[in-house]
Amino acid sequence: MALSVLGFEQASSWGWADVKTWGCIIGGLVILVGFVLFELRIPVPLIKVRIFKDRAFFIDNAVLFLSMVAFVPVFFFASVYSQVSLGYDANNAGLYLLVFFAGFAPAAQVGGRILDKSGAKPAIVAGSALAAVGFGLWAWKLTDLSLGSQWWAIVLSGAGIGLLLGPASTDATNRSINASYGEVTGITQTVRNYGSALGLAVLGTVLSNVFANRLTDSFAGFGIPAEQASALASAAASGSGGTSEGSSQLSTLPAQLQEQVGAAVANDFAVATQAVLIGMAIALAVSLVVSLLHPGGRVTEEKVEVDGATAPPPAPDPTAPTAAEK
């Protein structure tokens, strides 16, 4: 997992044509597949991968993976966007992120009630749909460079994630076959971490590439020579437009261009972040399609192992003495 994430994360630096990029991505996935095949063959596996045969468990984990592509990375990208494009300081960037939880917190309560009443499927289907629409609308309003025009879309995005996250996690735990609670939570947490790591790596590469390309065009439009424009854009993109390296490179420009450059950086970074949020919306749209395959239903009976399989607990013996009689 780490090797495949490294390949995606370094793609913006190494380049997609570099053998190291694809060596890490393909090598990591091959090792992961080899690990699964090995675990299927040994009598006492580290991870009982056969629990993925349960369709509900598999769908729950797929939804968790896809939703984590958006849920964790969005805090990094939104925080940097609020500072680079909106001009917020670090404290106000935190308040910008807080808007997300205005939708997340109440929706998480609703998702829990839906799970108890109707099972996980209604919650994860509705949550995936709402989150996909929310992130899409958020991306649409991002270039307005105003929180006032975005806050409702941010709330919708948070509500969608809040609606699906708890039910998917809880249902996965309840549906697992022939595995302990510790094994199941370890698997679901690993799936979530892998999704968020891949999301941050892949979308970070998208952000850097789109930002650099947009800045190169903007700088060229200001009359800066193409080679210098590309170098300045790369320096700014590598530091997200806000680090000392990017700032020092941009400070070498003529004074009369500084104001135009600042506006270009803010707008172009917003466009790059827009591409990132569109990617998140696509991941959540895929999550919606996957969630429709969930078998549905509620898990109400405690599962116990009987000869390596799962079954409801045996009915109590009416002739056995009660605890008080004992």
Image (cartoon, grey):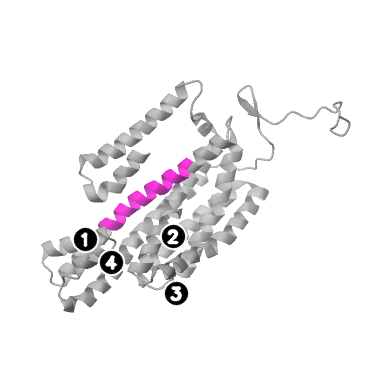
Could you tell whether 325 is left or right of 45 in the image? Answer: right
Counting residues from the start of the chain, the first of labels 3 and 2 encountered is: 2
Q: Label 3, on which residue?
A: 148
Which amino acid type is shown beneath numbered disc 3?
A: Gly
Q: Is residue 326 left or right of residue 148?
A: right
Cα separation between marks 3 and 2: 16 Å
Quadrant where the C terminus sits is top right
Residue at figure coordinates x 58%, y 59% from the top left = 107
Q: Which mark is residue 135?
A: 2
Tag shown at residue 235: 1
Q: Residue furthest right?
A: 325
Lower position in the chain sequence, tag 3 or tag 1: 3
Residue 94 shown in magenta: no
Q: Nearer the viewer, mark 2 or mark 1?
A: 1
Tell me the distance, in whole angstroms, between the alpha carbons under discs 4 and 3: 20 Å
Give the secondary structure at mark 2: helix
Amino acid marked by disc 1:
Ala
Task: Report whether residue 197 is seen.
Answer: yes
Q: Which residues are magenta?
A: 190-209
Q: Which mark is residue 268?
A: 4
Q: Is residue 206 magenta?
A: yes
Tags 2 and 1 in contact by the CB under 8 Å rule? no
